Image: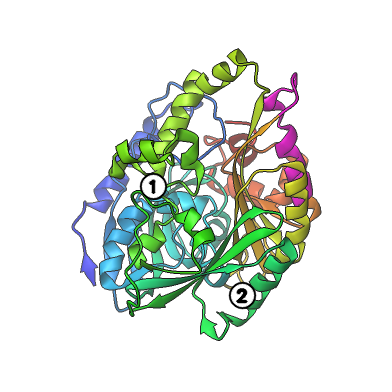
Amino acid sequence: MTTTPYLDYADAVDTVQAEYDAIPTGAPVRLAKQTSNLFRPRTQTQAPGLDVSAFSGVLAVDTDDRTADVLGMTTYEDLVAATLPHGLVPLCVPQLRTITLGGAVTGMGIEAASWRNGCPHESVLDLDVLTGDGRVVTATATNEHADLFHGFPNSYGSLGYALRLRIELEPVASYVALRHVPCGTAPELRSVIEEVTSTGSHDGRRVDYVDGTVFGPEESYLTLGTHTDEQDQPPSDYTGRDIYYRSVRDRRSDLLTTHDYLWRWDTDWFWCSRAFGAQNPLVRRLWPKDRLRSDVYWKLVALDRRTSLSTRLGALRRRPPRENVVQDVEVPVDALADFLDFFHREVGIEPVWVCPLRQRDPDATWPLYPLDPATTYVNVGFWSSVALPHGVDPDDGRVNRRIEQVVSDLGGRKSLYSTAFYGREEFARLYGGATYEALRAAYDPGGRLPDLWTKTVGRG
């Protein structure tokens, strides 16, 4: 057991509760955070925000039990920095460094181990939640707050905020050996995903991580990662001039340190850094290496939103309006080819990311984001914009609404970190309905926090 005397946790809890109680009834409640990985617009408020800066840090790493006691606002970058020296990592490490543990649990995180480990909330053993009615309660799968434990994932802060979480860890090796397997069309990609996730191997070799990149209707690659302590080639470095997603096309095998594998997508925000010119060779030589990070690009996006610079420049150049299409969806693996066929035909964003997902414990119930535990799903992530006909208002969500319809028709789900357009009735059917309302009544009867629909669809 390694313990960090990071702060007096009890004092920090008392302080934040007093601060919460001091917010006038009816005044908006929000967190005063320096970073965010949300891409949906929100109603601006002049409220100062709840100071949760004290809740960042790793309290303890238990190497025997393979657990970590972590404060809710701890970024995965800091969490991994505390666990990896012990040869351990969280069971699910979302690929962007500044995603917080509490944010990934109250939202929905996913990564290349999700085909065997599920999402971040599935490795939580217990958590302390500052609820909407001002209490701090400890929730586990079996105690008197088990309803909150199971209902907290996908609640996006509408039931409260995670102050501390105890999570499971798993052992890792020094390196991750990669195979970039060409798969061709969507049916071929689906077939390889089904094989790997059902057997845990490919061509007779164990697989620990699975994700993929789709560059077009007939070009896709499934990247298979395997833990290893053997260094049969020099490890690659994609934190400087070389760009990871391009290597998927150019190399059939690769080797990364485990640290660099976990953050392989962060340097270029998958491939979205190209929107800022960061993939231009000349710009990249001048761009400070420590600023090739997702949180830097996010700040540039936030600046553009505040100034509407790109929109105004597009109008001056008489370019068609563009709708932001930044989404992650989960569809059953059997429906992957149908979804990608629709996506290539009607949306046309390339490349896209694919990542298989399976519920870790088939007996668990997560009512606000229900998935069939007997089904393997595939997350499809796409983050760009689409040109619209002149005269069409991007805020109407024409493309995003169509995606929502197709995902629902195929028996899938859509993450709520970005724009959504569901009506209240459909939203309740998809995301918890009566169960969610019962949780609101139990933990925020005064309605101090915006409800889930208001927060994720109504821009509250």
Which label belongs to residue 277?
A: none
Q: Which residues are magenta?
A: 388-407
The answer to whether residue 368 is visible is no
Residue 127, picture quadrant: bottom left
Q: In this rendered view, identify the residue nearer to me: 148 or 58.
A: 58
Judged left or right of residue 230, residue 107 is: right
Where does residue 296 sit, x and y in percent of width and height?
A: 38, 38
Judged left or right of residue 255, residue 356 is: right
Give the residue pinned by disc 1: 98
CA–CA distance in space, label 1 to label 2: 29 Å
Residue drawn 73% across and 44% down? 403
Judged left or right of residue 263, residue 329 is: right
Q: In this rendered view, identify the residue nearer to me: 128 or 100.
A: 100
| Most frequent secondary structure within the magenta stretch | helix
Mark 2: which secondary structure? helix
Specify the quadrant that holds the C terminus: top right
Give the residue pinned by disc 2: 197
Residue drawn 57% across and 41% down? 445
Mark 1: which secondary structure? loop
Specify the quadrant that holds the N terminus: bottom left
Name the amino acid type tagged 1.
Thr
The residue furthest right is: 409
Name the amino acid type tagged 2.
Thr
Residue 389 located within the stretch drawn in magenta = yes
Residue 348, picture quadrant: top right
Residue drawn 41% across and 39% down? 278
Crowding around mark 1 (Cα neighbors within 10 Å: few <14, some 14 to 19, many 20+) is many
